Image (tube, rainbow, N blue to C red):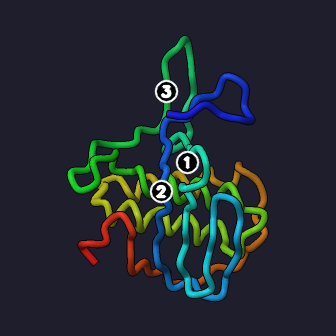
């Protein structure tokens, strides 16, 4: 867990202090920001090695009410990663949404990446989570890029290197 530097009294549920990546077929979309780098060859890197690590709350939405947290569950612990099963998918989705007004990926492409990462983890509710992300994700602001590539393929997952 980590305290927010920008939101008073905010503590994030997850913090990841290493860089991680996925390799996609979304080529020619290169950009570089504090927490995210997308290489022209389709590699999407979350830069968790920055001081303090990358922090997020897992799957959204979540609400605090009378000192309890209600909202979207992050699933069981994954045997292969020792993290909750939606952990890596939600991290990548969160950082891509964070830069929605700047990156050359559309909301639909980012949501499909989320679904594909959930499926790769073996999450049984991946289609339901994808449905709700598509339904409500537009509430999180405007995207720079509108046009989407039809088929999105993820060929590598850094946290599962030994399985690729």
Mark whose residue sits in front, 3 or 2: 2
Whether the residues at callouts 1 and 3 have beta carbons within 8 Å, the answer is no
Q: Nearer the viewer, residue 14 or 142?
A: 14
Q: Position of residue 38 (x, y in %)?
A: 62, 75
Mark 3 → mark 2, Cα distance in angstroms:
28 Å
Q: Position of residue 101 (x, y in %)?
A: 78, 63
N-term-proximal mark, 3 vs 2: 2
- Give the residue drawn at x 41%, y 38%: 73
Q: Nearer the viewer, residue 79 or 123?
A: 79
Mark 3 is surrounded, within 10 Å at the Cα level, by few (under 14), some (14 to 19) or many (20 or more) other residues, namely few
Mark 2 is surrounded, within 10 Å at the Cα level, by few (under 14), some (14 to 19) or many (20 or more) other residues, namely few
Q: For this view, does 121 lie left or right of residue 135?
A: left
- Give the residue drawn at x 27%, y 44%: 77
Disc 2 is placed on an element classified as: loop
Residue with the most extreme top position = 66
Disc 1 is placed on an element classified as: loop
Q: Which residue is mark 2?
A: 18
N-term-proximal mark, 1 vs 3: 1
- In this rendering, the answer to whether 104 lies above or below 16 is below
N-term-proximal mark, 2 vs 1: 2
Q: Nearer the viewer, residue 52 or 31?
A: 52
Viewport quadrant of the C terminus: bottom left
Mark 1 is surrounded, within 10 Å at the Cα level, by few (under 14), some (14 to 19) or many (20 or more) other residues, namely some
Whether the residues at callouts 2 and 1 have beta carbons within 8 Å, the answer is yes
- Please tell me in which quadrant of the rendered image residue 104 appears: bottom right
Residue 53's disc number: 1
Q: Which residue is mark 3?
A: 70
Whether the residues at callouts 3 and 2 have beta carbons within 8 Å, the answer is no
């Amino acid at each position: 867990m980590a305290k927010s530097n920008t939101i008073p009294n905010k503590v994030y549920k997850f913090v990841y202090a290493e860089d991680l990546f996925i390799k996609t077929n979304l080529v020619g979309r290169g950009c570089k920001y504090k927490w995210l780098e997308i290489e022209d060859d389709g590699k999407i890197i979350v830069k968790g090695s920055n001081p303090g690590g990358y922090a997020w709350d897992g799957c959204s939405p979540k609400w605090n009410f009378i000192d309890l947290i209600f909202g979207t569950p992050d699933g069981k612990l994954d045997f292969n990663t020792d993290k909750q099963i939606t952990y890596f998918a939600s991290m990548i989705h969160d950082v891509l949404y964070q830069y929605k007004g700047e990156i050359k990926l559309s909301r639909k492409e980012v949501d499909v990446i989320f679904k594909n990462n959930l499926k790769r983890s073996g999450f049984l509710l991946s289609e339901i989570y994808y449905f709700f992300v598509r339904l409500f994700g537009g509430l999180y602001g405007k995207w720079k890029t509108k046009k989407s590539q039809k088929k999105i393929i993820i060929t590598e997952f850094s946290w599962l290197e030994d399985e690729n």
